[in-house]
Amino acid sequence: MIAIIDADSILYRACHNVKTLDQATVKYLDIAKEYITETWADRAVCYVKGEGNWRYDVFKYYKAQRSHNKALFLRQYGMNVDMIPVLIDWLVEHKFVIRANGMEADDLVRRRAVKCVDRGQNFTIVSADKDLDCIAGKHIRPYKSTLNEYTITQEEADYNYYKQIMIGDETDYIKSPRLLGPKTADKLLNSTPRGQWKSMIEREYKERCGKEWLHALMFTGSLIHIQRYKDDFFVWDKNKGNFWECGFKEAPACYGYKIDELEAKARQNEMS
């Protein structure tokens, strides 16, 4: 059994109420050991955020809505945010984690899970991120002082994936067609046979986005999509290819992003 750990959330726990790197490393290793023990894993691989992210080539304001004073907010609750990059460097140097450069840790987690399936290896995904529920298999989600264990079937994984394509992700500022929220998405998916989910989603995008439906679908889908292998980008129509091969750039006009506000938030994020 291999534990595939999205270790970004561990970093924040490890850097809470600490003053030195030694304190942070001890906390990190204790938490990681707990996760490995709970999964009954023989070994583990941990992924953390790195430099760059291909999603910014789709939308340069991806995650720009995140508060510029997030660091200040975290400090108020005892988070030593300045220790996080120092801890990452130490963990990388000592080969406790792998840095996800050019992508997100989620991408490497899913790619490793796919490899395990191909090789017939048992695995458990450990992550606080619900986005990884698009992966079929055993999961453990840390929540406060507990570890919630559950299993995702392939149908559930597909359901979660297509639902995200329909509703986007408000946290990361990934918009979706107007009036297409979680409740509506659940209703549509549950009332549509599984084999017709794609055609139903396409219909909803066409009805809600008009002539820009494909641009909107490729935009939201590309940002939502978590890679299964290298250079695995979101494709809806094989004859048209990925976002860039379709000739699209940035967000569709129908999503109504306010670029001036996004520019201001991006500058604030850089300064925080």
Image (tube, rainbow, N blue to C red):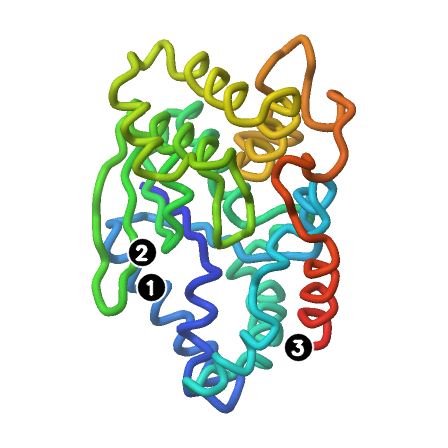
Type of amino acid under label 1: Lys
Mark pair 3, 2: CA separation: 34 Å
On the rendered image, what quadrant is the N terminus found in? top left
Residue in view at x 21 percent, y 48 percent: 149
Quarter-of-image position of residue 180: top left
Within 10 Å of disc 3 (Cα), the crowding (few <14, some 14-19, many 20+) is: few
Quarter-of-image position of residue 120: top left
Query: Which mark is on residue 33?
Result: 1
Type of amino acid under label 3: Ser
Residue in view at x 41 percent, y 31 percent: 161
Vertical placement of residue 192 versus 248, above or below: above
The answer to whether 205 appears left or right of 185 in the picture is: right
The answer to whether 117 appears left or right of 192 in the picture is: right
User: In the rendered structure, which disc, 3 or 2, sits on the residue that comes first in sequence?
Assistant: 2
The answer to whether 117 appears left or right of 190 in the picture is: right
On the rendered image, what quadrant is the C terminus found in? bottom right
Residue at the extreme bottom of the image, as rendered? 19
Within 10 Å of disc 2 (Cα), the crowding (few <14, some 14-19, many 20+) is: many
Whether pointer 1 and pointer 2 mark residues with C-beta atoms closer than 8 Å, the reply is: yes
Mark pair 3, 1: CA separation: 32 Å
Residue in view at x 50 percent, y 91 percent: 19
Residue 131: percent from left, percent from top: 42, 44
User: In the rendered structure, which disc, 3 or 1, sits on the residue that comes first in sequence?
Assistant: 1
Q: Of 56 and 88, which appears nearest the observer?
A: 56
Label 1: state its secondary structure: helix
Query: Which mark is on residue 272?
Result: 3
Q: Which residue is mark 2?
A: 36
Whether pointer 3 and pointer 1 mark residues with C-beta atoms closer than 8 Å, the reply is: no
Type of amino acid under label 2: Ile
